[in-house]
Structure formats: C-alpha cells, structure tokens
Image (cartoon, rainbow, N blue to C red):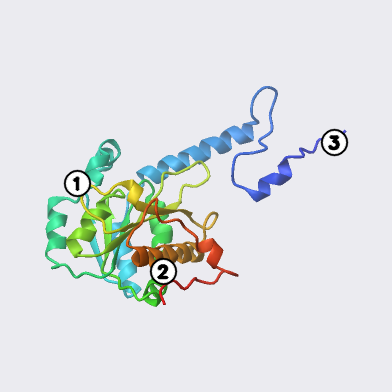
C-alpha cells in the first residue's frame, strides 16, 4: 500500500492551503507551524510602517512628479479603528494640493499603503511605469502622482477634485491573506467627487507575481480607462472585457 498522498501533487499549482495531511485527528506539526508563519506575515503586512517618502523618491527617479500627503489618520491604530479618517486628507495635506492650482490631467494616480505597505512598496512603481505608456497611447494625460500615508480608497476622490483630474486610479495595499501578504489593488473612478459610491468604481485585484502580473494588470487598467473615457463612467455599468480583446498578451486599442 502506497504512503504517497494523491493530493500532494496538486499543491504545486496553487498557494492555497490544500492537501495538508493529518497526524491522527490533527494537522501535522509542520502545517501548524506553517499556518502560524503565514498568519504572522499577514499581521506584519498590516502593521509594517509605510515609507511614503522613499516611494515618492523612487517615482521621481523614474521621471514622474510625486507628492507625499497624509490622511486624517494620525497613526496606525487610528487608521485601523477609524476607517473614515483614512478616507479624507489631513488639513495640511489638503492645503498642499490646493496650492498646486489644479494642474489637471485626465487621470491622477494616488498610491496609499492601505492594509499592506509591503504590497505598495513592492509593486506600485513597476505598475505605474508599465501603465504610463499605455495611458499615453490612449491619448490621456497623467497629473502628478500623489502618495498617501494612511489612505483608504475613497481618499482618491478628494485628491482628484483638488488637482482637477477627470478620473483617479488608486493603487492600494489589499487586506493580506494567509498566502498573499503583498497583494496590490487598483481602483478606477471616473468623475469622482464627494459621496462617490464604491458601485461607481472598477477594481483590478491581486496584483503580484503569484497573482495577476504587472503587465496583465496594466493592460486591464488601460482597457478600463479607455472604455471609461469613451462611455463617461466606471463601476457596475462598465464590465471588464479586456480578456476578449487581448490576443497573445497584446494590449487592446480602444480609442480610434
């Protein structure tokens, strides 16, 4: 009789917790320890401080204008316990953006740590650099990149209004899972403003090497922005059909 677990071969196809085995009525010790390590990594992702200034410097080195601002959540404990504070800028940061005099641009990119600074610091610069020429191909202009410490998705609406952008792309660290402490999310909103509902946004999720690649994410985001500006909306009325138009990994052409 073979001792080989027929499920174990499936583990090479997914980081999900499958085929864990058992020791009597419990999990094997190795799996209990692995679970504890994954849980610790997820908690670390939530609490790791965000180096917003360092990310802004990286973006500037790539030829982008970058501004660092803060939400109204003055510390991590406040951010986690008061989500509403993370949805609005601090008064000082609001003044910083007001002083820019609405530089405009069709799209403003905002980057916030969210629930995983690791995700943002690992993937945001690469995604912005890959997305930038795709946006230009669509004939759309980018405003300054705004790096937000302690921000949540809706803070992008206020940022877009202050800089005079027609749409906002919020890149934010997603809630860590036990196998994904570095997952980046991208939220697109056309015509953002006070009271904008999440139903008016499109989301591209799980951007990381083990999930959706940077190139594929950039292609999807560019497709959605092209469709958004063509139709004047984002959200539940804008379905992502990029996979139907992309053949062999190429980028779709939306605006002709």
Residue contact between numbered discs 2 and 1, judged by CB atoms under 8 Å: no
Mark 3 / mark 2, whichever is N-terminal? 3
Mark 3 vs mark 2: give the one in front. 2
Outermost residue to the right: 1
| Count of labels in the image | 3
- The residue to which callout 3 is attached is 2
Q: Position of residue 224 (x, y in %)?
A: 41, 62
Query: In the picture provided, is 45 more to the left or to the right than 54?
Result: right
Please tell me which residue is depicted at 25% across the width and 45% down the height of the picture: 86
Q: Position of residue 99 (x, y in %)?
A: 11, 65
C-alpha separation, residue under disc 2 versus residue under disc 1: 29 Å
Q: Position of residue 226 (x, y in %)?
A: 39, 67
- The residue to which callout 2 is attached is 131
Q: Position of residue 231 (x, y in %)?
A: 36, 63
C-alpha separation, residue under disc 1 versus residue under disc 3: 60 Å
* In the depicted structure, whether residue 170 falls above or below residue 81: below
Q: Quadrant of the N terminus?
A: top right
- The residue to which callout 1 is attached is 72
């Amino acid at each position: 009789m073979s001792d080989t677990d027929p499920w174990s071969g499936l583990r090479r196809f997914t980081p999900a917790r499958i085929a864990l085995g058992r020791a009597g009525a419990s999990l094997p010790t190795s799996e209990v320890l692995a679970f504890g390590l994954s849980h610790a990594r997820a908690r670390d992702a939530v609490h790791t401080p965000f180096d917003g200034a360092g990310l802004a410097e990286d973006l500037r080195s790539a030829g982008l204008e970058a501004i660092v601002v803060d939400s109204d959540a003055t510390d991590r404990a406040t951010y986690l316990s008061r989500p509403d504070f993370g949805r609005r800028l601090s008064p000082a940061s609001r003044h910083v953006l007001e002083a820019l005099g609405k530089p405009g641009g069709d799209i403003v990119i905002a980057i916030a740590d969210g629930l995983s600074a690791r995700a943002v610091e690992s993937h945001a610069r690469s995604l912005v650099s890959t997305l930038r020429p795709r946006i230009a191909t669509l004939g759309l202009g980018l405003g300054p990149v705004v790096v937000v410490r302690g921000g949540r998705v809706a803070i992008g609406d206020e940022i877009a209004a202050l800089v005079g952008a027609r749409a906002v792309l919020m890149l934010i660290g997603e809630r860590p899972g036990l196998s994904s402490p570095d997952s980046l999310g991208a939220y697109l909103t056309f015509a953002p403003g006070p009271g904008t509902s999440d139903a008016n946004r499109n989301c591209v999720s799980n951007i990381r090497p083990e999930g959706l690649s940077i190139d594929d994410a950039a292609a999807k985001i560019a497709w959605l922005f092209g469709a958004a500006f063509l139709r004047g909306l984002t959200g539940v009325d804008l379905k992502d059909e990029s996979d139907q138009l992309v053949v062999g990994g190429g980028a779709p052409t939306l605006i002709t």
